[in-house]
Image (cartoon, rainbow, N blue to C red):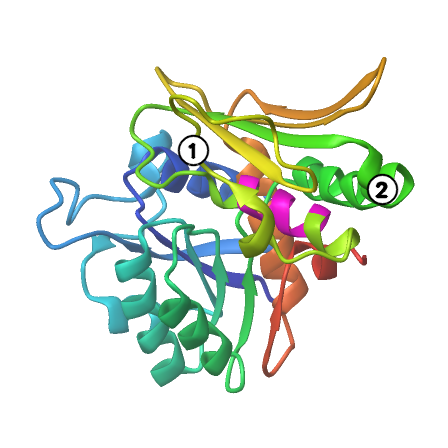
Amino acid sequence: MNKLKIAVCGASGKMGRTLIGCIREDEALVLVGALETPDNACLGKDAGGLVGFDSGVVISSNVDAVTSGADILIDFTRPEGTIEHLKSCLSNNTAMVIGTTGFTDIQKNSIKQAAASIPLVSAPNMSVGVNVLLRLLKTASIALDDDYDIEIVEAHHKHKVDAPSGTALRMGEVIADSLGRGLSDCAVFAREGYTGVRKPKTIGFSTVRAGDIVGEHTAIFAGTGERIEITHKASDRSNFAVGALRAAKFLSGKKEGLFDMQDVLGG
């Protein structure tokens, strides 16, 4: 059986290490590349050694060398790095799974344009559970309509640099779309001082950054006399890695196109 050749960006980070470990456990996949920044202390080391095995794959900062040897590049880094990696994938006709968040509109457009040439899965959260949550939010939003106030609360570790999280924003988009609204028109991202009463048909966002919280997201639908809360809590990063590898398998054999995790899950 020909194994799907996977390269991992940010190999020495927590997410990178988790991906490397999960790739080793999947008989359909093989690690062929591990990418890091030029100043990273792990350059030249065996990528598998980061999680306790000998992979024979040396961690490199040479983007083209890594992407050219892979079928699919998995990237959970930063927007500016991801866009540079995307350019290399275009040059080498390498598919890409993007779990990075915090893109500008211009960067998002670059991803859309690249999808005309190579296949991409881009999603703010690769967790299968989170993507089931998004389906539930659509159902709840349609059923509850405008009679309930909606708040989205998310919590992550203290090192996360963007807020609200990409997942929280996607939750807001799903809810707003289901209610026939545009999120940019109804989102409330900050409250301070004398704010007055809550405006109807708005979607509020609250952000927590503390400790080593992997990721928690809750949508609150608050009506008169009752409250519905739909929550997803991640206790470790393996669920994101498993979802990303599922996305990689989904891309196998595809020539081009931009997909999300709903496509991967058959939604």
Residue appearing at x 40%, y 76% in the figure: 110
Q: Callout 1: 10 Å neighbours few (<14), some, many (20+)? A: few
Q: Position of residue 189 (x, y in %)?
A: 46, 38
Q: Nearer the viewer, residue 168 or 143?
A: 143
Residue appearing at x 53%, y 33% in the figure: 205
Can residue 27 be seen here?
no
**Residue 169 on the magenta span:** yes
Q: Nearer the viewer, residue 166 or 26?
A: 166
Q: Nearer the viewer, residue 127 or 68?
A: 127
Q: Nearer the viewer, residue 59 or 228?
A: 228
Q: Label 2, on which residue?
A: 145
**Residue 89 on the magenta span:** no
Residue appearing at x 72%, y 30% in the figure: 149
Q: 197 left or right of 146?
A: left
Residue type at numbered disc 1: Ala
**Measured along the vertical axis of the image, is residue 198 above or below residue 128?**
above
Q: Main secondary structure of the magenta part?
A: helix
Q: For the N terminus, give its image quadrant.
A: bottom right
Q: Position of residue 266 (x, y in %)?
A: 80, 58
Q: Position of residue 244 (x, y in %)?
A: 56, 50
Give the residues drawn in magenta, as a range. Answer: 168-175
Instruction: Give the number of the disc on residue 190.
Output: 1
